[in-house]
Image (spheres, rainbow, N blue to C red):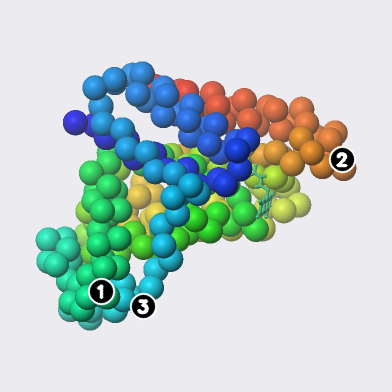
Amino acid sequence: MPTLLHLDSSPRKGSISRRISGEFAEAWRKADPEAAYVYRDLAASPVPHIDDAQIQVMHRLEAQGVRDLAAAREAAASPEEKASWAVTWPLVEELLAADTILLGVPMHNFSVSSTFKAWFDRVLIPPLIVDPVSGEGPLSGKRVVVASARGGAYGPGTPRHHCDHQEPYLRAALGMVGLASDLTFLHAELTKSAHVPRLAHLKDVAATSYEAALDGARDLGGA
Ligand SMILES: Cc1cc2nc3c(=O)[nH]c(=O)nc-3n(C[C@H](O)[C@H](O)[C@H](O)COP(=O)(O)O)c2cc1C
């Protein structure tokens, strides 16, 4: 059964990244009401930061070159490792089960929100990394859509283009686990023009960017 995994990570009630991801999810669910839908709000229910116990398990998987997921699931040894792995493994299974992964990610300090990063650090475990020979991994082939909102503008030709550590970072990290071959970014930019007086003259540009992101979400979600 087609499965959508939808994550949001903005702590903001009036969040624009949530609005864009919500639009995609609504269109996707309307297109196939029987399909499975899994929602995780990383701001309301944050994933605990990665800890020493999980890193011990990951080091062992790397040292032994474990790529088999069934073996990785059983890799925790001490009580601390088992407790930490019990937090991580359901998140890994959610990813594995999804055909489409929808990530609501605000730009925070030129990068991603800390709750998103905490989830990412837990879930990107060594056996998910693409095989260097085949270039494939267990997550290869899945579709990923990133619904993003940014206070400023970061497109090519803008003065802050070089400060965008959100999209390039996500492309690199998702690519490491085979999730960059069908990857789309929907950015709403200049959201700060709504409340920062010196950006007020850019409200029209912001509105156009937002509408384009919403249209893109509806189109992609319904496809
Ligand atoms: C902690 C924090 C850091 C931020 N850092 C940036 C930044 O580096 N660049 C930027 O353009 N906007 C920045 N913003 C503004 C957000 O990107 C903007 O409000 C965006 O709409 C957030 O997404 P949301 O509407 O889904 O919450 C920041 C906001 C917060 C709360």
Q: How many marks?
A: 3
Packing grade of label 1 (10 A; few <14, some 14-19, many >=20) is some
The yes-or-no answer for disc 3 within 8 Å of ligand 1 is: no
Q: Find residue 187 and report its image quarter.
A: top right
> Can residue 181 be spotted in the picture?
yes
Could you say which disc has been placed on residue 52 in the image? Answer: 3
* Residue at numbered disc 1: 81
Q: How far is disc 3 from disc 1 in space, using C-alphas?
A: 8 Å
Give, as a three-letter code, the residue at label 1: Glu
Indicate the position of residue 138 as horizontal and vertical percent values.
22, 53
Between disc 2 and disc 1, whose residue precedes? 1
Q: Secondary structure at mark 1?
A: helix
Q: Look at 17% across and 66% down and name the residue there.
A: 72
Q: Is residue 16 left or right of residue 95?
A: right
Taking the spot 87% from the left edge, 42% from the top edge, the residue there is: 198
Can residue 223 be spotted in the picture?
no
**Please, what secondary structure does the residue beneath circle 3 have?**
helix
Marks 2/3: CA–CA distance: 45 Å
Check residue 144 in the rendering and tell me which mark sits there, or answer none: none
Q: Is residue 52 left or right of residue 161?
A: left
Please provide percent x and percent y for residue 13: 60, 38
The image shows residue 161, relative to residue 4, as above or below, that is below
Where is residue 60 shown, x and y percent of the image? 23, 79
What amino acid is labelled 3 in the image?
A: Asp
Q: Residue at x 29, y 68 (%)?
A: 84
Closer to the camera, 35 or 143?
35
Callout in the foreground (2, 3): 3
- For this view, does 127 lie left or right of residue 23? left
Q: Indicate if the residue with disc 1 has its beta carbon within 8 Å of ligand 1.
A: no
User: Where does label 2 land, which residue?
Assistant: 197
Q: Are marks 3 and 1 in contact (CB under 8 Å)?
A: no
The quadrant where residue 103 appears: top left
